[in-house]
Image: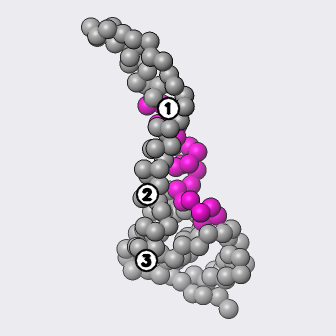
Amino acid sequence: MAIKRDLVIIGGGAGGLVVASVGAQLGLDVVLINKEEAMGGDCLHYGCVPSKALLKSAAIAHVMRQAKRWGIASVDPCVDMTAVNRAIKAAIDSIQLHDSRERFEALGCEVITGEACFTSASRVQVGDRSIEA
């Protein structure tokens, strides 16, 4: 027997999290299904956030090298990639707090970890759970 919900969202990436948040705030009965325990999707963990943090480190090093153009003593910075990677991880961890299971459960979403599979036009299966919306 399937449980019935107003809205089932597959994927806790940027788009899915926005839809889940808005749906819950509108009073809908929302289920958010994410394959991984950590939500945030590719943007948070592999793409947007890590790449922008890396670009920021590169931009700072570039400014330090070019400072003489602006009347400031230039330096050739020693780039410590271990420290750069720690900064990238810190950026991800900071945002992850807003993308957490706990936050979305507090908004009223049911969060299920697992892989969703459509069994009909209005039903998905996650493990042994069947959800209809």
The x and y percentages for residue 132 are 61, 83
| 1 vs 3, front mark | 1
**Secondary element at image label 2:** helix
The x and y percentages for residue 124 are 66, 77
Q: CA distance from mark 2 to mark 3?
A: 17 Å
Q: CA distance from mark 1 to mark 3?
A: 38 Å
Asked if the magenta segment contains residue 38, the reply would be yes
| 2 vs 1, front mark | 1
Mark nearer the N terminus (1 vs 3): 1
Badge 3 crowding class, 10 Å Cα cut-off, few under 14, some 14 to 19, many 20 or more, is some
Asked if the magenta segment contains residue 58, the reply would be no
Vertical relation: 67 (above or below) 37: above
Amino acid type of the residue that numbered disc 3 sits on in the rendered structure: Gly
Q: Which residues are magenta?
A: 34-56
Q: Which residue is mark 1?
A: 83
Q: Which residue is mark 3?
A: 108
Mark nearer the N terminus (2 vs 1): 1
Mark nearer the N terminus (2 vs 3): 2
Q: Which residue is mark 2?
A: 97
Q: Where is residue 21, by image quadrant?
A: bottom left
